[in-house]
């Protein structure tokens, strides 16, 4: 697993919204926003947050969380914040089918098995 983007990728990404997904269940357990190498910061986080607890559980099984850049090239922090908040609300309400549908809609993908 990589732990940072090359500079040329950082330039292309701009602001982005990312997901941490459990590799066994496919469920989103964290939604974040950022730019640069922010997406990788959680892998080094030593706090006792729910997010880091899940990452530690996944790693104890010899796996790594799946990281998805949901949208990128956002021009400003506000747009990434709005998308990130919408996805967090969805995930917090345990609406997994709605959340997956939203993920696919933002990605511009339609798959009957997920909607």
Image (tube, grey):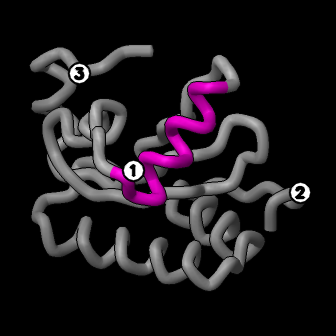
Which residue occupies the foreground of this view, 65 or 74?
65
Q: Is residue 13 magenta?
A: no
Q: Which residue is mark 2?
A: 113
Question: Where is residue 75, by image quadrant?
Answer: bottom left
Could you tell which of marks 1 and 3 lies nearer the N-terminus?
3
Q: Which residues are magenta?
A: 48-60
Q: Residues within 10 Å of mark 2 (few under 14, many from 20)?
A: few
| Label 1 close to label 2 by CB (< 8 Å) | no
Q: Which residue is mark 3?
A: 5
Could you tell which of marks 3 and 2 lies nearer the N-terminus?
3
Dot 3 falls on a residue whose secondary structure is loop
Q: CA distance from mark 1 to mark 3?
A: 14 Å
Write the residue at 29% across / 39% down.
46
Write the residue at 77% across / 37% down.
24
Q: Please identify, in this view, whether the residue under mark 3 or under mark 2 is nearer the observer.
A: 3
Q: Which residue is mark 1?
A: 18
Apparent side of residue 110 relative to residue 104 in the rendered image (left or right): right
Q: Residues within 10 Å of mark 1 (few under 14, many from 20)?
A: many
Question: Where is residue 41, by image quadrant?
Answer: top left
Q: Assign the C terminus to one quadrant of the image.
A: bottom right
Provide residue 109's location: percent of width, then percent of height: 65, 54
Apparent side of residue 67 relative to residue 79 in the rendered image (left or right): right
């Amino acid at each position: 697993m990589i732990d940072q983007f090359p500079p040329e990728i950082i330039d292309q990404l701009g602001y982005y919204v990312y997901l941490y997904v459990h590799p066994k269940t496919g469920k989103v357990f964290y939604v974040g926003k950022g730019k640069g190498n922010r997406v990788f910061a959680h892998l080094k986080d030593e706090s006792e947050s729910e997010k880091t607890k899940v990452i530690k559980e996944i790693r104890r099984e010899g796996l790594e969380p799946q990281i998805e850049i949901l949208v990128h090239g956002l021009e400003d922090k506000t747009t990434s914040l709005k998308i990130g908040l919408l996805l967090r609300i969805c995930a917090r309400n345990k609406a997994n089918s709605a959340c997956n549908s939203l993920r696919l809609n933002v990605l511009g993908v339609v798959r009957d098995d997920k909607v």
